[in-house]
Image: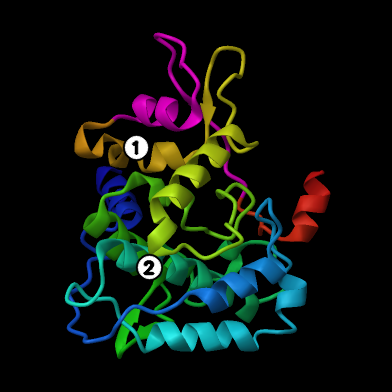
Amino acid sequence: MKSLLALAFTALVGVPTCRVDDVKSDSRPVSHELWTAELQEFVSDEGWVDYAAWDKDTARLVEYLNLLETHHPNDANWTRDEQLAYWINAYNAYTVKLILDHWPLESIKDIRPNGKGFVNSVWDIKFIEIEGHKYDLNNIEHGIIRPKFEDNRIHVAVNCASVSCPPLLNEAFTADRLDAQLDSAVTAFLKGPRNDLKASGNPKLSSIFKWYGPDFDWKGGSLPKFIETHSGYSLPSGKTFEFLDYDWGVNSQQANVKES
């Protein structure tokens, strides 16, 4: 049993199974205007996605992904924020592509081309190629974004295309506005329906905060400090967090209608 749990934890946090090597590239930063245009057309202000309409018009998405695939971030020519914005946008854009490639479907977890198992999930499919280097979604989140940038706000920025995920922002993340965008996304998530900080004095949080609890200790922080800083709420003294069940249903506009 212990070995099974250890395998599950390793698969989740991405160490070492999601580790990636450094890539040498001479590319320059790219514009994310195409991605913003797509998000503005197909994603509501609340983060619900019209996959049915998007599935009928993917040309601009393909153009944006082609741009990403020929420009690999590097430390020589890209600032930290340019790299982080790129990888967040890449994660979200490739997740949308994955959903559209299998549309219609009820949940991203229904995409299981190679059977079942901890290392055989939708997040392990190596369908991403950037300057000849192949990645899966786990590589991007757990092999690049988390270890390289150590910014726990990314957990509300990368989107798993599910109802309980933090809302998909309907504009691209950009280097010049990255801090403000991440702060705003965290605040909106904490004050939105996917968390309940005033629930009878017992704060109820998304399971994301349970799964990635250690990330909120980065740089001398803590989960309570993170919650209070970004929500404006004072947490009740001595109370422990409760974690909400996670809805893996696809974050489509049709699902939002059912929720309402």
Residue at label 1?
213
The spot of residue 169 in percent (x, y) is 57, 57
Q: Is residue 220 magenta?
A: no
Q: Is residue 230 magenta?
A: yes
Instruction: For marks 1 and 2, give the CA distance.
Output: 22 Å
Give me the residue at 39% from left, 50% from top: 179
Front residue of 63/107: it is: 63
Q: Tell me which numbered mark, 1 or 2, is placed earlier along the sequence.
A: 2
Where 202 falls versus 165 (above or below)? above
* Quarter of the image with the N terminus in it: top left
Q: What's the magenta region? A: 222-247
Residue depicted at 64% across the width and 77% down the height: 100
Disc 2 crowd, CA 10 A, few/some/many (<14, 14-19, 20+): many
Residue occupying the far top of the picture: 237
Q: Residue at x 30, y 29 (%)?
A: 222
In the image, residue 106 above or below residue 150: below
Query: SS for tag 1?
Result: helix
In this rendering, position of residue 93 left or right of residue 119? right
- Is label 1 or label 2 in front? 2
Q: Is residue 193 left or right of residue 22?
A: right
Q: Amino acid at mark 2?
A: Trp
Dividing the image into 4 quarters, which one contains the C terminus?
top right
